[in-house]
Amino acid sequence: MAKSALFTVHKNEPCPRCGAELVIRSGKHGPFLGCSHYPECDYVRPLKSQADGHIVKILEGQLCPLCSGELALRQGRFGMFIGCSRYPECEHTEQIDKPDETAIACPQCQRGQLVQRRSRYGKTFHSCDRYPECQFVINFKPVAGVCTHCNYPLLIEKKTAQGLKRFCASKQCGKPVTADQNSE
């Protein structure tokens, strides 16, 4: 019995294993190329190129600080980044969006600073710059201040139906703090 696919489109390319025609099929992880003689031949390969750090564009005039090669805009599995065009000989990389430092002390370890970061899904969060030693994380914008209810040394800013509101950053408290209460 043949494995069902949402659609099959003939590619007119021979299978490298058995020589039969390859077809485009759709699976749970997206489209792929597979042998038309499945299940006798189970050859498959990804249809689109994997996000392997391939070069999108050479950044002319910008040189690698390690090897003086040209820098390139690359596409990787976690998004775009800048890297040396001489990879793998030179492994220099840079972030495009460098984290924004907030100059707010981490309330958990009291030694680090909170920095803005972006998850692989594009969501913004703030965490301690001493990660992995300190694993403090919040999903809202941190604001310097002290909670008037529990004296926690950090507030967060949330968008509500009434506009921007400030709340205690402590998960145990989380109470709203009015503007006249935090102007100490």
Image (spheres, rainbow, N blue to C red):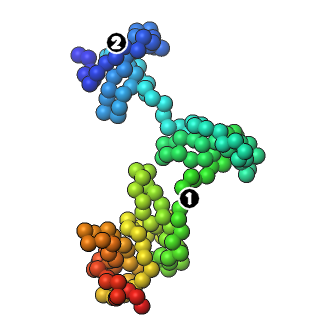
In this orientation, does residue 101 appear? yes
Return the residue found at the far front: 162
**Front-most of residues 90 and 122:** 122
> Which mark's residue is nearer the viewer, 1 or 2?
1
> At label 1, which amino acid type do we have?
Lys
Q: How many numbered marks are there?
A: 2
Name the residue rendered at 61%, 47% in the picture: 82
Between the C-alphas of marks 1 and 2, the distance is 49 Å
Return the residue found at the far left: 1
Does residue 78 appear left or right of residue 146 in this picture? right
Q: Position of residue 13 (x, y in %)?
A: 45, 12
Name the residue rendered at 60%, 43% in the picture: 73
Q: Is residue 92 above or below residue 43?
A: below
Return the residue found at the far bottom: 184
Name the residue rendered at 26%, 17% in the picture: 2
**What element does badge 2 sit on?**
loop
Q: Position of residue 39 (x, y in %)?
A: 31, 16
Which tag, 1 or 2, sits closer to the chain's start? 2
**What element does badge 1 sit on?**
loop
Q: Position of residue 165 (x, y in %)?
A: 32, 75
Residue 74, disc = none
- The image quarter containing residue 36 is top left
In this orientation, does residue 87 appear? no
Question: To which residue does mark 2 refer?
Answer: 37
Query: Pointer 1: residues within 10 angstroms few (<14), some, or many (20+)?
Result: few
Q: Is residue 37 above or below residue 184?
A: above
Quadrant of the drawing holding the C terminus:
bottom left
Residue 98, disc = 1
Return the residue found at the far top: 19
Query: Pointer 2: residues within 10 angstroms few (<14), some, or many (20+)?
Result: some
